[in-house]
Amino acid sequence: METEVVSSVVNLAPVAKALSIGLSGIGAALGIGMIGSKAMEAIGRNPEAVGKILVPMLIASAFAEAVAIYGLVIAFSIK
């Protein structure tokens, strides 16, 4: 009596891609939302400081957006 071993291979690449894009997108969205919220709060408290708040806010938003781009690059590199 021979026993047959049935092997099944599960492809987890789509799950890994979805997780990398999804988690990095959620992280970037939360980060950018918090940055924008605090910047608008600061401008509301001190309207004359718009010039001092705007540039750091844009730089921080760009860094947060880079996280989402890194997630996209990782998703494309998964095979």
Image (cartoon, rainbow, N blue to C red):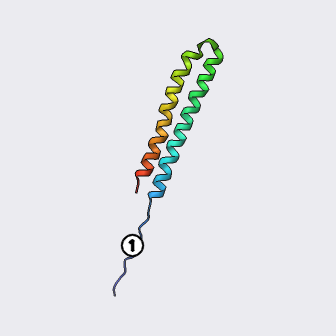
| Residue type marked 1 | Ser
Task: Determine the residue positioned at 59% across, 32% down.
Answer: 33
Q: Position of residue 60 (x, y in %)?
A: 50, 27
Q: Quadrant of the C terminus?
A: bottom left
Q: Quadrant of the N terminus?
A: bottom left
Quarter of the image where one finds residue 7? bottom left
Which residue, as the protein is rendered here, is positioned at the far top? 48
Q: Which residue is mark 1?
A: 7
| Side (left or right) of 2 relative to 32 | left
Task: Determine the residue positioned at 51% across, 22% down.
Answer: 56
Q: Which of 12 and 73 lies nearest the eye of the viewer?
A: 73
User: Dot 1: few (<14), some (14–19), or many (≥20) neighbours within 10 Å?
Assistant: few
Compared to residue 25, the image places residue 64 above or below, namely: above
Task: Determine the residue positioned at 47% across, 41% down.
Answer: 69
Which residue, as the protein is rendered here, is positioned at the far right? 44
Compared to residue 76, the image places residue 48 above or below, namely: above
Could you tell me which secondary element the residue under label 1 belongs to? loop
| Side (left or right) of 11 relative to 45 | left
Q: How many marks?
A: 1
| Side (left or right) of 31 relative to 10 | right
| Side (left or right) of 52 relative to 10 | right
Task: Determine the residue positioned at 44% across, 65% down.
Answer: 10
Q: Which of 5 and 69 lies nearest the eye of the viewer?
A: 69
Q: Position of residue 45 (x, y in %)?
A: 64, 15
Q: Position of residue 6 (x, y in %)?
A: 40, 76
Which residue, as the protein is rendered here, is positioned at the far left? 2
